[in-house]
């Protein structure tokens, strides 16, 4: 049982008050609360006390694994000599027989990698390099041989005209996990890092296919390695499957893959199947075409409370109207503008650049919008995503889609929605509400001017302090 906490001299809704937490909920709020003998007292110093942040779309295991991997793309690696250097250095540090895992690769570094390009850089050690989209791995010849993929029937194994694997594997994470049989990443450092950002809850948007894949998450929540509340999506195969204790059940994840679009009837049938089980869907859409297909499927199957479009990376004006009419939430990642906006200027049609990762126009149209980082594909710090939603500046300082900028208060609100209703009514610091809180060093007005995780003084999950700034 967590001891009672008394947060003294904190700002709640603009007022200076004290807040008592007991049994995992907010027990009392007022200016005259006095410490009891059993209270643990935290001095707030006038800082704002907020509901803790909820990241509505990230990938926990992938983010933890990325922290243990080699960065192989921008901004850390910008060219082929840089890629060769980081792979060579990692090769020299690893024990014999260990895998070399690299992440974040992009074609601007050294073109479209295949097994031969990796062989030229690291020929002897088994190497796998993940594209920054997360959808593709490239393996060198040593890795392909070690896994016996020459004859494997998995449809994601790309082959040349002679039937020989090119080294590129598409949407094959589960195959690699099965064959490599590596110990899963340690989730405790990630849980601790998220706590420094004021994050008290996350929705893992990975399309898990079976309950055993979720065992590591369940264990991390059970042991406290992940102090956050964890909601999981899971694919259509997880309908009706019991989840490990401690995990919340989110929407059914459905992917509209730009590499292989599903048939409209198939997509509509999956939506209808989820709805028949009482579950909303979260449809992954990262192109205008994917959004068209998803909306057409929703028109056939109907929408359900809690249905979401994940990313909505490119949305034409008529699609914004369509989303509003259907009552579909968009969970967006403005951090991509900050981290990849310069690439988008080169790679995305000029007519679509103002339609990337919309915020303002969606909100104006009445579309509920939830905020997320999509870590590890952007930085896991939600405050960075908030700043990107406000200024929409790229690394080079270009403002991309200026009409989509929103106020700092709206940007903060993207991360204050309920886990099952991103973009809906914000959670509140109120008596009887869960004691999932973020205490800042400064008043809210100052925090909104700065939008930085450096202002997080303490994070409380279920009444327990899981982070306290030095």
Image (tube, grey):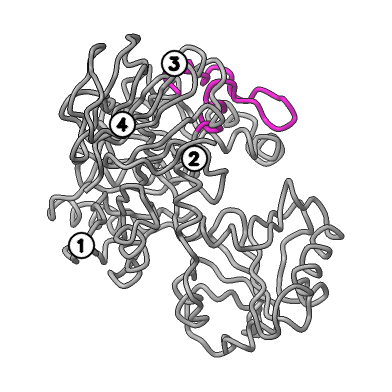
* Residue 226 rendering spot, x and y as whole percentages: 38, 54
Residue 387 forms part of the magenta stretch: yes
Q: Which residue is mark 3?
A: 444
Closer to the chain start, of discs 4 and 2, is 2
CA gap, disc 1 and disc 4: 25 Å
Q: Over which residues does the magenta segment extend?
A: 383-411
Closer to the chain start, of discs 2 and 1, is 2
Q: Nearer the viewer, mark 3 or mark 1?
A: 3
CA gap, disc 2 and disc 1: 34 Å
Classify 330 as above or below 225: above
Q: Residue at x 29, y 47 (%)?
A: 297
* Residue 60 rendering spot, x and y as whole percentages: 44, 55
Mark 3 touches mark 4? (CB < 8 Å) = no
Q: Which residue is mark 2?
A: 196
* Residue 400 rendering spot, x and y as whole percentages: 63, 25
Classify 65 as above or below 377: below
Image quadrant in which you'd find residue 148:
bottom right
Q: Which residue is mark 4?
A: 417
* Residue 301 rendering spot, x and y as whole percentages: 20, 47
Q: Nearer the viewer, mark 3 or mark 4?
A: 3
CA gap, disc 3 and disc 4: 18 Å
Closer to the chain start, of discs 3 and 1, is 1
- Classify the position of the C terminus by image quarter: top right
Name the side, left or right, on which 168 lies relative to 444: right
């Amino acid at each position: 049982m967590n001891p009672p906490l008394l947060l003294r001299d904190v700002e709640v809704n603009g007022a200076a008050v004290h807040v008592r937490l007991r049994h995992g909920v907010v027990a009392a709020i007022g200016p005259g609360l006095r410490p009891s003998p059993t209270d643990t007292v935290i001095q707030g110093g006038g800082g704002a006390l907020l509901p803790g942040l909820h990241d509505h779309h990230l990938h926990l295991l992938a983010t933890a694994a990325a922290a243990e991997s080699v960065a192989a793309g921008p901004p850390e690696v910008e060219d082929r000599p840089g890629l060769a250097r980081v792979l060579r250095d990692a090769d020299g540090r690893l024990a014999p027989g260990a895998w070399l895992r690299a992440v974040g690769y992009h074609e601007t570094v050294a073109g479209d990698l295949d097994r031969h390009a990796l062989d030229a850089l690291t020929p002897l050690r088994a190497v796998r390099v993940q594209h920054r989209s997360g959808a593709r791995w490239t393996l060198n010849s040593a890795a392909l041989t070690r896994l016996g993929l020459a004859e494997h029937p998995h449809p994601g194994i790309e082959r040349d005209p002679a039937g020989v694997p090119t080294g590129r594997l598409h949407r094959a994470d589960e195959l690699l996990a099965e064959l490599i049989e590596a110990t899963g990443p340690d989730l405790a450092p990630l849980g601790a890092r998220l706590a420094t950002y004021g994050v008290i809850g996350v929705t893992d948007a990975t399309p898990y296919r079976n309950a055993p894949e979720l065992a590591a998450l369940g264990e991390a929540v059970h042991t406290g390695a992940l102090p956050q509340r964890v909601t999981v999506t899971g694919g259509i195969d997880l309908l009706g499957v019991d989840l490990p204790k401690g995990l919340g059940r989110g929407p059914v994840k459905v992917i509209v893959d730009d590499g292989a679009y599903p048939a409209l009837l198939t997509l509509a049938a999956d939506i209808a199947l989820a709805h028949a089980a009482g579950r909303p869907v979260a449809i992954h859409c990262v192109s205008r075409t994917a959004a068209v297909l998803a909306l057409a499927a929703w028109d056939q199957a109907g929408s359900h409370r809690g249905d979401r479009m994940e990313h909505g990376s490119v949305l034409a004006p008529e699609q914004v109207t369509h989303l509003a009419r259907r009552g579909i939430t968009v969970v967006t990642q403005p951090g991509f503008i900050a981290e990849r906006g310069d690439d988008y200027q080169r790679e995305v049609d000029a007519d679509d650049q103002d339609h990337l990762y919309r915020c303002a126009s969606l909100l104006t149209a009445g579309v509920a919008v939830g905020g997320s980082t999509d870590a590890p594909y952007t930085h896991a710090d939600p405050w960075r995503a908030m700043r990107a939603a406000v200024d929409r500046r790229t690394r080079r300082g270009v403002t991309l889609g200026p009409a989509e900028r929103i106020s700092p208060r709206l940007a903060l609100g993207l991360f204050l929605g309920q886990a099952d209703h991103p973009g809906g009514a914000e959670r509140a610091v109120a008596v009887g509400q869960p004691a999932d809180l973020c205490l800042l060093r400064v008043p809210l007005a100052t925090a909104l001017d700065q939008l930085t995780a450096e202002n997080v003084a303490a994070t409380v999950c279920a009444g327990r302090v899981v982070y306290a700034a030095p």
